[in-house]
Image: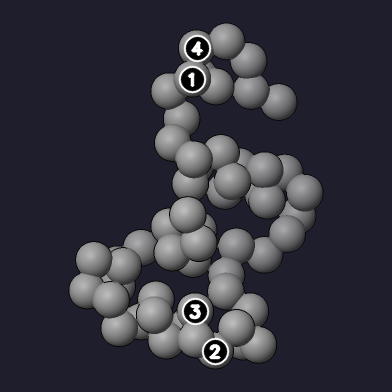
Amino acid sequence: MIKGRDSETLSAANKIRLLLTYLNCPTTIPDTLKNLNKFHTTTSELKNKDAIETLV
């Protein structure tokens, strides 16, 4: 999937994002995780980030 130098330079969020995309999994926060969704939408440094950044 990722070999060589790319595997060393990718951030954890990008590795997770790539893996989830490869497995056809959604990269959004499920509605059932209400507290995590609230944290994502109310934390200023996460407002313009996707769910993966919040989880990492």
Amino acid at dot 1 = Glu
**Where's residue 48, x and y in %?**
30, 67
Asked if one can make out residue 8 in the rendered structure from this viewpoint, the answer is yes
Direction from residue 22 to residue 12 in the image, left or right: left
Dot 3 alpha-carbon crowd within 10 angstroms: few under 14, some 14 to 19, many 20 or more? some
Q: Mark 3 points at which residue?
A: 36
**Where's residue 26, x and y in %?**
67, 65
Q: Name the residue under label 2.
A: 34
**Where's residue 16, x and y in %?**
59, 46
Which residue sits at x=68%, y=51%? 20
Residues marked 4 and 1 touching at CB (< 8 Å): yes
Q: Tell me the SS state at disc 4.
A: helix
Q: What's the mark number on residue 46?
A: none
Q: What's the mark number on residue 8?
A: 1
User: Which numbered disc flags the more N-terminal residue, 1 or 2?
Assistant: 1
Which residue sits at x=64%, y=23%? 2
User: Which numbered disc flags the more N-terminal residue, 4 or 3?
Assistant: 4
Residues marked 3 and 1 touching at CB (< 8 Å): no
Q: Name the residue under label 4.
A: 5
Q: Distance between the residues labelled 3 and 1?
A: 29 Å
Q: In which quarter of the image is residue 18?
A: top right
Q: How far apart are marks 1 and 2 (CA)?
A: 33 Å
Amino acid at dot 4 = Arg
Determine whether 52 is above or below 33 in the image.
above
Amino acid at dot 3 = Leu
User: Which numbered disc flags the more N-terminal residue, 3 or 1?
Assistant: 1
What count of labels does the image hold? Answer: 4
Which residue sits at x=49%, y=40%? 12
